Image (cartoon, rainbow, N blue to C red):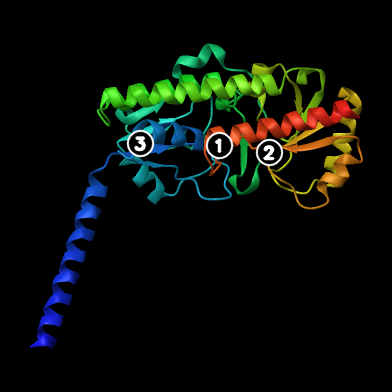
Amino acid sequence: MRELTVRLGAGLLAGCAAFLFSFSAVEAEDRPRVVAVNAPLQYFAARLLDEGAEVEFPVPDGVDPSFWRPTIADISRIQGADLILLNGAGFATWIDRVSLPRSRLVNASAALKDRFIVTESITHSHGEGGEHSHEGLASYLWLDPLLAVAQAEAVAAALTRKGLAPGDAVAARLAALRADLEALDDAAAAALEGAGDVTMIATHPRYHYLARRYGLSISALEWEAGAMPSPEDLATLEGLVTQTGAKVLIWEAAPPAGAFAATEALGLQNVVFDPLARSEGPFIEGFAASVEALAAAVRAVAAN
């Protein structure tokens, strides 16, 4: 009898567990699903929705989201999302090659076209993404926190319009996010005050909006992110240093051991500034950390 009771109890527990798992799975399926083409938009949407929806950034680790090529399965999952957040300005070139439901697309920079930075159209290879072009537009808009505010506002408006969250809740969260981004901008402006007097070089053209916002002078190379520069790369860098008088080299990703020593030999202060397109950490903390690293490099130049 005791054995039967134990078996019945175990069966009931197993049944309850199965029911709860099934209920949780259904509940998760019922939650709205939002897809973002980069990490900043994912961050903005997640903050605006809180726990009310699933916000996905589908790009695999180690792949540049600007030039990711989704599989058929990836496209199918994206097409089924309740909302698809685009960055605009030529970012995420794959969107021009696939069919996406127009009613669910939100271009978070649609109202910012008059503030886009036009660049030279550059075609080159980038890892496994193959040959691609920068489309003649700078697309890393969020590196100006005030443009990030505008993108967050566009996301909030879309979430409310689509009924994916109560409008008053989205408005309250937007106010908090806007305040955080504006405080981030104030802190960056203070940290980088006077940094425009120090000429810089970036290993990749990501920092146009950062430079414009804070009055920085940044020339750009076309190096592979996180790769060891070749002798030819270093020769090109040396020529650019001679031409510009640059004192700081900005890396978009940490390079292998020995790279810093090679560039320090050219009289450069090295700094890694994550452009945050696919950063796994919170956007605000990541931006603040990169700005402080850049400010420290500028201070080091002044100290020498």
User: Residue 223 placed where, x, y %?
Assistant: 74, 40
Name the kind of residue labelled 2 in the image: Glu
Q: How would you rate the neighbour count of disc 3 (Cα within 10 Å): few for under 14, some for 14-19, many for 20 or more? A: some
Which mark sits nearer the N-terminus, 3 or 2? 3
Q: Distance from label 3 to label 1 (Cα)?
A: 26 Å
Nearer the observer: mark 3 or 1; the answer is 3
Which mark sits nearer the N-terminus, 1 or 2? 1
Q: Is residue 61 left or right of residue 190?
A: left
Query: What is the secondary structure assignment of the residue under circle 3?
Result: loop
User: Residue 194 placed where, x, y %?
Assistant: 77, 17
Q: Distance from label 3 to label 2 (Cα)?
A: 30 Å
Query: What is the secondary structure assignment of the residue under circle 1?
Result: loop
Q: Quadrant of the C terminus?
A: top right
User: In the image, which disc is placed on residue 280?
Assistant: none
Residue of label 1: 66
Name the kind of residue labelled 1 in the image: Ser
Q: Is residue 299 left or right of residue 162?
A: right
Say whether residue 289 is visible: yes
Residue of label 2: 252
Q: Is residue 86 left or right of residue 127?
A: left
Q: Residue at x 45, y 15 (%)?
A: 111
Q: Residue at x 11, y 86 (%)?
A: 2
Query: What is the secondary structure assignment of the residue under circle 2?
Result: loop
Q: Residue at x 80, y 38 (%)?
A: 270
Residue of label 3: 50
Q: Is residue 23 above or below residue 52?
A: below
User: Residue 229 placed where, x, y %?
Assistant: 80, 45
**Res 42 quadrant in image:** top left
Q: Is residue 113 above or below residue 184?
A: above
Q: How would you rate the neighbour count of disc 2 (Cα within 10 Å): few for under 14, some for 14-19, many for 20 or more? A: many
Q: Quadrant of the N terminus?
A: bottom left
